[in-house]
Image (cartoon, rainbow, N blue to C red):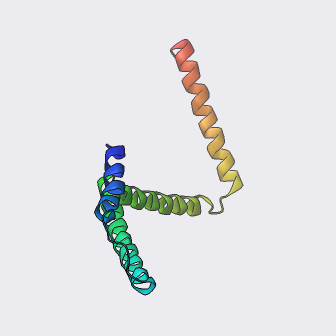
Amino acid sequence: MKIITFITFAVVPMALFAQAPAPSSSFDGFGSVLMVLLICAIIFIVCRELLCWYYKINKMVSNQEEIIRLLKKIANESNAPTNNTKLGDEKKGVLKELIDSTKFMVTGK
């Protein structure tokens, strides 16, 4: 589906401008080329927005920005200074719970 969409958006502008007449003079040719480039740029912008909407790229980018914001918030909260003795007590408590649960799994008591 992506290939078909890409080919359609790539071939249609070329088919529309394939039968354009040759410019009569150099100045008129410059104006025609400028007009063709302007039309191509507008078509590109419209097609890009349609493709981004269709494949939900804009939504994915906004979700990633929200994830980054939340991760930064979490990182700032975890960088707060803590009391080393309190942290040591928490580690000891976790270790004790781990040992107790292991004993229970082995002995059933």
The furthest residue to the top: 107
- Residue 42 lies, in percent from the top left, at 34, 72
Query: In the figure, 41 relative to 13: above or below?
Result: below
The one nearer the camera, 76 or 87, is 76
The one nearer the camera, 28 or 3, is 28
- Residue 106 lies, in percent from the top left, at 56, 14
Picture residue at 65% right of the left edge, 42% below the top: 91
The furthest residue to the right: 84
- Residue 50 lies, in percent from the top left, at 30, 60
Q: Indicate the quadrant where residue 44 lies.
A: bottom left
Q: How many badges with numbers are in the image?
A: 0
The furthest residue to the bottom: 27
Query: In the figure, 53 relative to 98: above or below?
Result: below
Picture residue at 34% right of the left edge, 54% below the top: 11
The one nearer the camera, 79 or 91, is 79
- 65 left or right of 94? left
The image quadrant where one finds the N terminus is top left
The one nearer the camera, 6 or 33, is 33
Query: In the figure, 58 relative to 104: above or below?
Result: below
Picture residue at 66% right of the left edge, 62% below the top: 81
